[in-house]
Image (cartoon, helix red, strand yellow):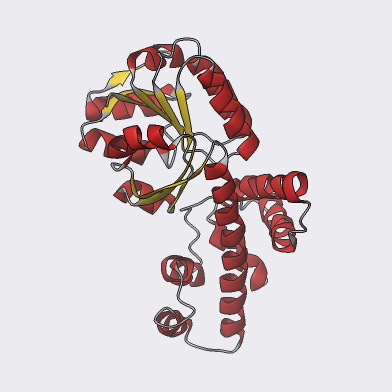
Amino acid sequence: MKTGVIGLGAMGMPMALNLHRAGHLYSIWNRTRSKAETVARETGCLLADTIKQLAGACEMIITCVSRDTDVLEIINAIATSIKPDTIVVDTSTVSADTAKKAAARLSAKGACFLDGPVSGGVEGASKGTLAMMIGGEEPVLERARSTLTAIAANIVYMGPAGSGQATKAVNQHMAAGINQAVTEALAFGKSLGLDMNKVVDVISSGACSNWFLQHRGKSMLAGNYEPGFKLSLHHKDLEIVKSMGNNSTGMALPMVEMTLIHYQQLMEEGFGDEDISALFRLKQGT
């Protein structure tokens, strides 16, 4: 399926390259053109001058941007030239309401929309092993599935439009709790004078093993916070989680509230572009 990618950031670029390796990438567009030029040179794909040009040439369009307003701006641009039955898959992390608005906008043009946020970080995007949670019409997903397998190893249909983003909100909420637990526990262990690399090794083989501990434990202990997932982006996602909780269920989300406060402090101190494991800075008081 001739596929276009809009948004070539930390996640979008490796997804585009994996689509190219699988023979699906046809066209790309990025707000910062130099990034798109680099991918076009490497892959030989069409470098679109405008979103309208890309949308008119592709059978599937994958979007990967940062914020709700960006998604809706791009969807509106796509809608000016999209062909009927074209599938748009948004892999951004935005609100469920934004996904529903995008679906309605494209449906009016006879096109199809899937909200398909992903989990797995930059590593998963590079390896093509992302988990993808899909909202929309299930028959549309089945049409898209063979192409999406180039970027995701686990693609799960969650329900109608917005269900993918609702599932991602659960994921981001859980990621906040795991970050809080792991960083605080490691700071506690360090204060006890333990060999913390050994602590990470032994706990990673037991009941408390988790991806974050295995992949970020030793790097945070070494003071390395190179981003796999930027703290400022997780802050943005948790604002979405908070809003969805307030508007949809009225639930109190104390873990989310606490993490937003901690992330805000770190961003004010200049650490917003570091990995979310930079929360360890606060836990150990540095």
User: Picture coordinates of residue 131 (x, y %)?
Assistant: 41, 51
Of all residues shown, which one is farthest toward the front? 139
**Can residue 108 be seen by looking at this rendering?**
yes
User: Picture coordinates of residue 201 (x, y %)?
Assistant: 40, 81
Residue under the point 61% across and 85% down: 191
Quadrant position of residue 100: top right
Q: Is residue 119 above or below residue 82?
A: below
Determine whether, in the image, residue 43 is placed left or right of residue 180: left
Determine whether, in the image, residue 61 is placed left or right of residue 261: left
User: Picture coordinates of residue 39 (x, y %)?
Assistant: 31, 29
Disc tally is 0
**Can residue 95 be seen by looking at this rendering?**
no
Residue under the point 45% across and 10% down: 81
Q: Nearer the viewer, residue 53 or 227?
A: 53
User: Picture coordinates of residue 145 (x, y %)?
Assistant: 32, 39
Position of the C terminus by quadrant: bottom right
Residue under the point 39% across and 32% down: 140
Determine whether, in the image, residue 237 is placed left or right of residue 221: right
Quadrant position of residue 83: top left
